Amino acid sequence: MAALLGSSLRLLLRDWRGGELGVLFSALILAVSLVVGISGFVNRLQINLERESSRFLAADLVVSTADRTPESFIARAAESGLARGETVTFSSMVVSESDEMFLASVKAVGGAYPLRGSLEIEDTNGQLTANQPNPGEVLLADRLVQQLNVLPGQRVWVGDAELVYAGKVISEPDGTSGFFGYGPRLMMHTADIEATGVIQPGSRVTFRLLISGSPDQVSEFADWVRPQLVQGQRLLTVEESQPGIGATLDRARGFLLLAGSLGVMLAAAAILVAARRFGERHTDHVAVMKSLGATSTTIRNLYAASLGWLGIAAILIGSVLGWLAQSAMFIALAEQLPGEINEIGVSPYITGAVTALVCIGFFAWPPLARLGLVSPLRVLRRETTIAGSQRALDLVLGTLSLAGLMIWYSKDVFLTSALMGGIAVTVGLGFLGARALLSSSRQLGSRAGSVWRLALAGMQRRGVNSAFQIVIFGVAIMLLLVLVSVRTSLLDQWRLQLPEGTPNHYLLNVAPQEADLINDFFTDKNVEVGRLYPSTRGRVMAVNETPLPTWEIGQEGPRQQEANFTSGAVMPEGNVVLDGEWWQPGTTESIVSLEEGFAQEIGAEVDDVLTLRIAANEFEARVANIREVDWESMQPNFFVIFPTEVLSRYPGMLLTSFYLEPGQKPVIGDLIDDFPTLTVIELDVVIDEIRAIVDQVSQAIELVLMIIMVAGALVLIAGVTASVDERLHESAILRALGARRGRILGAIAIEFSMMGAIAGLLAVVGAELSGWLLQTQMLELDYQPGWILWPFGLVLGALVIGGLGTYTCRRVVSVPPIQVLREV
Amino acid sequence: MITTSQLTKRVSTADGDLEILRGIALEIKRGETAAIVGASGSGKSTLLGLLAGLDVSTEGDVVIDGTSLASLDEDERALLRADKIGFVFQSFQLLPALTALENVMLPLELSGASDSDQRARDFLDRVGLSERRDHYPRTLSGGEQQRVAIARAFASEPLILFADEPTGNLDTATGAKIIDLLFALNTEQGTTLVLVTHDMSLAARCGRQLVMQAGELEEAS
Ligand SMILES: Nc1ncnc2c1ncn2[C@@H]1O[C@H](COP(=O)(O)OP(=O)(O)OP(=O)(O)O)[C@@H](O)[C@H]1O
Ligand SMILES: [Mg+2]
């Protein structure tokens, strides 16, 4: 055993000296570092972004309840070592010493609130702090200070509690989560809640338990809590509370995993080619060893052990490089996400190691395993070939193993199938097309000039090998094209997702009679304001007269749902009807439009009749259509929409959105001064956040793209190098016979350019197929067939492969022929 | 030492079966030296391949030192080669990735010898190449390469040495030196030597001359 390890190491070092391992080893390292780098980066990005976005919740996870948070939840969180905070929110009249009264949106905070993000408070000395209010104190929004006319140190009454005014609330991290609550903010300590006497059975109060900790702890807690939630209790997560950020993140992750998978495929292709060449070059070596008495077992063990060494080295080096790569990708993001998580965990390294093993086992090993079958007779008769060549089976097994690896790695069967489909088409067409072209090129060649004849004859003589090379080139170019085109659409999509002028503020609680005044106000200030939507809280009670159950523990299936109802004659922008039809303006029929997910939750389909309740009124409406909503658009979105005439019987408030340029912030103050009962929700922070993420992730994507390009180049180099030996010999003979170097190089250039052109064409076909599947199905982007790609692929393939091939083979005409001919 | 009976080799080609060897009966005793001569394409290399267990016969058997090759599988034949057989080829067959010393060590390592390094050095000394120990085959002349090959063949002290046109790629003077070396080591180790050659003077130095003609072997008188 020790002897085997020793001699395999020696074998490896000798081969290394001989320069035969370069491509194989680089490809292995590349595969490992790509996987480690990308999955490390994706992990880290996700954790950091979630953390960053979690400031919008002021926590990693929130349990929202209509009643006091159950003691068992708090106890469990304490047990798990999670950091805790609490908030209690409700609306209440507030009274000042000067007897001014105003309806405030009260938020009592306690524990370690805020767990994420920070408060901005201006104390009564004008100092900025981040401290939550002490028991006995209140902090007020500027507007409330004005309305109540309070001075520092004066008393303020919330219900029965008497509190001291101790500063102003400038901003709070979780200001944008939860749309309810009227009036400007009053912040107090939870210790004083009891004293207010506000919390009575039936009062509208929201209790929140805020949780933060390591991702594992938090998700463990979430899994524990979720099944115990009863009616009125909800779990708020970062992704749900910020769908825009969540979706952006998902796309970025999807793309990076796609890129990683492509990279691994490219590396696998390079390994396959390099290992084949390695095997071919070692055939004589093995024949001699066998004639000297080595058994096939010895040979196999020797090569297996060598590959083992190679794998270990590649895993180690690749892991280090991968770590460096993800750090490099993260440097760009570091500013945006102040260094929170710096560890990528062990899972990327495990994934990297498994990738190396799969690449070795299914791509590098088969050609070497066959070395065991080499006949020792080769030492006497050179042309004796390897017994039982099974390349096709190798390819099939390799592809299957790679598919398995990708599914495991990206957890995405669809992505894998789309790529495999493209590859299968490229490979299938490749072998057929290459064959046909190769055989017809013979006739072409006989009529062509001597350089062309030489080129075509060369291509044809190498028959199967040429076809194999074409297919490998084709797959490599295809994968690169897919990646480039998906990247381009993704970046375009991102640019379009939040165009300049996307509404960055919501305006709630607009009374119907204020609507015109508010429109005038905005026209006056030169601010673009969106459509005004009626918004009334309502509830779905029954579907087709079957009452829906209320919430009960552990119960699955449809149940009652509450939502903001709106109405309109036309469908909101960005919505798409999936089933049914949108109504004619002016209809008085009692019909309703439902959002896809909402319809599912209540178990309703088009033409079902819903029983709805608004306040104390019950009425029926038929489902006219089911819509898809673009949650990332940052526009007001509604689950339930009625025709204008239907909802007008149940008057409610209105809401709208508007866009403020960065310098227009003071408009909000003016607005509130003129309309004190309005609630403004500022989304500009969230939008900036999404934009920043997109920018930074785009940079990371470019970096990944560059690495993948290297992988692609490696495949091309491996493919080109594969035939150098043979060409070397041929060229030596031709030159010995008097051929000029220019003619030989010309023939080589033509041969590679032709192969490149065919490969380029094939690649475009495969890329179109995969690209179409990926973009339309996985990334949900629009797909446009890239007709320009066709000539582009052809010319690019010819130029790149032609250039690379000629460059790599230049040695063929510079080595003195005698040296080659002597080398046997 | 080597006995064959009815040794036949047929291969199938595009235009039907081709019988290369036609029932060859041969006996070579321990320590004998035998030369096989004959026209090109008469089947000499094929016979050598069968005798050395590099290939399997279509009919008949080869018995080496009491072991019937027909009863062995490929791997068992390899072990037999490691144990008892050495080779010298026309085209040297040194491994280009290995130095002269490493080439000589190879069979010693394969048969698990513990002092392979020292023995390989000794044998390189014997063939006068101790200076070129760490050189790669491509930097050695043909004669030097063949000397390395001879060192490799004798280093494992085989019972039988097969040589297929050992001087075929060398000029007459170098060829003569190689042959001297071959016979010197052969005498020293008492090896049984079977060589294929076109060189009549070389054949004459062997104890027996066998003539191959159209797949049949005859003893020259
Ligand atoms: N596997 C095979 N398939 C087809 N023909 C074969 C095969 N092996 C040997 N031959 C043919 O058998 C004949 C004998 O070959 P062999 O190599 O034994 O000749 P040789 O006597 O060594 O010739 P030379 O002196 O030229 O080396 C040749 O015509 C050769 O082409
Ligand atoms: Mg021969």
Image (cartoon, helix red, strand yellow):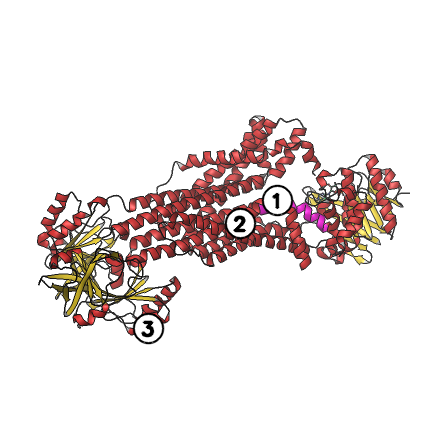
Residue B95 point in image, percent of width and height: 70, 45
Task: Report the quarter where the C terminus of chain A lies.
Answer: top right
Quick one: A345 or B48, which is closer to the camera?
A345
Q: In front here: A726 or A223?
A: A223
Number of the label disc, if any, that sits on residue A20: 1
Is residue A289 covered in magenta?
Answer: yes
Residue A632 lies, in percent from the top left, at 28, 51
User: Residue beneath label 3, please?
Assistant: A75
Q: Main secondary structure of the magenta part?
A: helix
Would you place residue A660 above or below residue A738 in this image?
A: below
Region in magenta: A274-290
First along the sequence among labels 1 and 2: 1
CA separation in Å, label 1 and label 2: 15 Å
Which residue is the site of mark 2?
A29
Q: Quadrant of residue B214?
A: top right
**Residue at mark 1: chain:** A
